[in-house]
Each structure stands twice: as C-alpha cells, then as structure tokens.
Image (cartoon, rainbow, N blue to C red):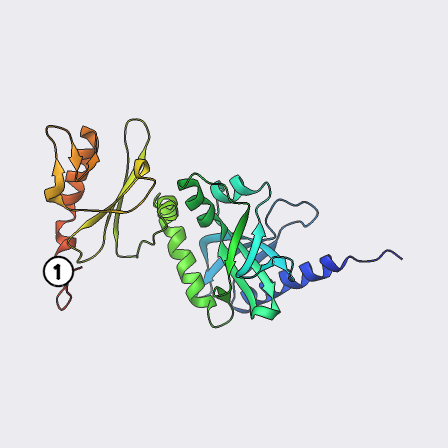
Amino acid sequence: MPKVPESRRIGRMAVNEVRALLERHGHIVQEIDGGNDHGEDLHVTFVHQGQRTEDSVALQVKGGTSTRTRRGHRVPVGDHGENWRDGSVPVLCLVHDPGYGGLLWANATRQLRRAQALRKMPKSIVVSRQSLLDDASLGSFVRAMRHNLAREREGVGRWADMADVQFAPEDIVKPFENEVFEPMVFWQRRGEAHATLLHHDLDWEPVRIQEPMLRFAPIPSVGHIILDIAEAHWLMSCFRSTEWWRRPIEGHTPS
C-alpha cells in the first residue's frame, strides 16, 4: 500500500489547529485546494457579534520544525512574494510548533511591503517566538487585523506597512500623489504638536514636521525636504484642517 508522507500528516495537523482555533471563536474558515500550491492554505472571514464582517485574510500554514531557526521561524517566500505583497487580501504566515507554545504568526504582506520600501526582496518571512496566537490572544489579534483592513480600504494601509508604523483609529491620515504619481502621507496624532510626513522619496522614513517649517519661496520645502508647489499647498491644507487635532489634550503633556 502507498505510504503517506510524514510531511503531509504534519501539515494537516497544523491546518487543523488553525481551523479549530478560529472556528472555536466563530470565524469563517475556508480551505483552499491543497492540490495546487498557490501560497495560501486558508481563507478567513472575521465574524463580530455573530455577524459576518467585510474583513478577510489569507493564511499560509506550516507545521513541524522545518521552519525553526535559533531566533524563531522562517517561512520561505518562494515565488509568492509579489502575490503576498500586492494581492487583494493580506497574507499571514502561521507556524504550528508545539515545542514553542503552539501557533505563531507573522504578517507576510507587511514584511514584504517594508522590504520593498528598503529595496529588498526577502527569501523568507520572519515569525517571532513572541507572536503567539491562542484563545487568549485571538481577540486582540482580530481587532488589530480588522483595523489594518479598514486602513487598507482608506488607501493608506500600504504606506503604513512600508513605513513600518501603525495608525491608531483616531489618527488623521491624509494621502496624496504628486503629478508623477509619487505617494506621500500626512499623519496627525491626537494632541501632538507636530505631524509626521511619510514620503516616497524618503524611503518612507517618518519625518516630524510643523507648520512653521513650511516654505513656498524661494523653493517650496518643509524643513530640509524639497517639495513641488502642489505638495506645498497640499501640506498647508493638511496643517490648517488638522489644527484642532494638535491642541493639547486636557491632563496630557504633548510630546
């Protein structure tokens, strides 16, 4: 009789662990045909208070110790890099390793977008030993993922990933593209005296800016950053429309 490969048993065990955890908390899990390796094993739609939401993610699931390293785990990207980075839904990598607490996870889409900002293409996704996914942590995990997906729909999720920052629900985030389609983002946190600029030409490194730093002549600029005239006018409108959000919060010392 044909022998069933051990790798298949380990892989099925991993997928079943992920499915059981998510379905135990009411989320909708659909398995993707395992006959073709498209880089995802499960499609998950989150459920909130018994109602299906508009928020979905794809999961790549690995089992056993083959991905284990001295510092955690690494899931090979293979030829899935562009799909995981630019697909219509985020892709997460989950590793089932009972020796390290069970299920561990990483946001493959976010890691690949950040690598793109740094002009790199990683060969693997890093899964930290601290990123445990279990019954206790699943609620906060789902809330964070749903918030990230809401920012995706606003058109700013990609830029948060590339800059390796997190936008809070109450943050004001205003995207802009100049005439050569270079994106940038104005980011204002509640009660902070400064805003933050995320800029394509700055490799998405966050830069603190304030309205007095903005100049229109002799060369449009904000601090040391050279702008074109449309960018300068856009920044001025951002500063003026968010002035009220920079006012100090009562009982809070602005940073």
Give the answer, above or below, for where 104 lies relative to 215: below
Residue lying furthest front: 70
Locate residue 154, reporting x and y percent: 34, 45
Residue under the image location 47 percent in, 72 percent down: 136
Q: Nearer the viewer, residue 32 or 72?
A: 72
Locate residue 108, reporting x and y percent: 50, 50
Dividing the picture into quadrants, the one containing residue 217 is top left
Residue lying furthest bottom: 136
Does 16 sit left or right of 53 as displayed? Answer: right
Q: Which residue is mark 1?
A: 248
Q: In which quadrant of the rendered image does the C terminus lie? A: bottom left
Q: Mark 1, residues whose alpha carbon is within 10 Å: few (<14), some, or many (≥20)?
A: some
Q: Nearer the viewer, residue 52 or 189?
A: 189
Mark 1: secondary structure? loop
Dividing the picture into quadrants, the one containing residue 143 is bottom left
Residue under the image location 49 percent in, 56 percent down: 106
Does 214 sit left or right of 101 as displayed? Answer: left
Residue under the image location 16 percent in, 54 percent down: 245
Dividing the picture into quadrants, the one containing residue 146 is bottom left
Q: In which quadrant of the rendered image does the N terminus lie? A: bottom right
Q: What type is the residue that disc 1 sits on?
A: Pro
Residue under the image location 55 percent in, 49 percent down: 124
Locate residue 227, reporting x and y percent: 21, 32
Locate residue 48, reporting x and y percent: 44, 63
Does 26 sit left or right of 246 as displayed? Answer: right
Does 141 sit left or right of 17 as displayed? Answer: left
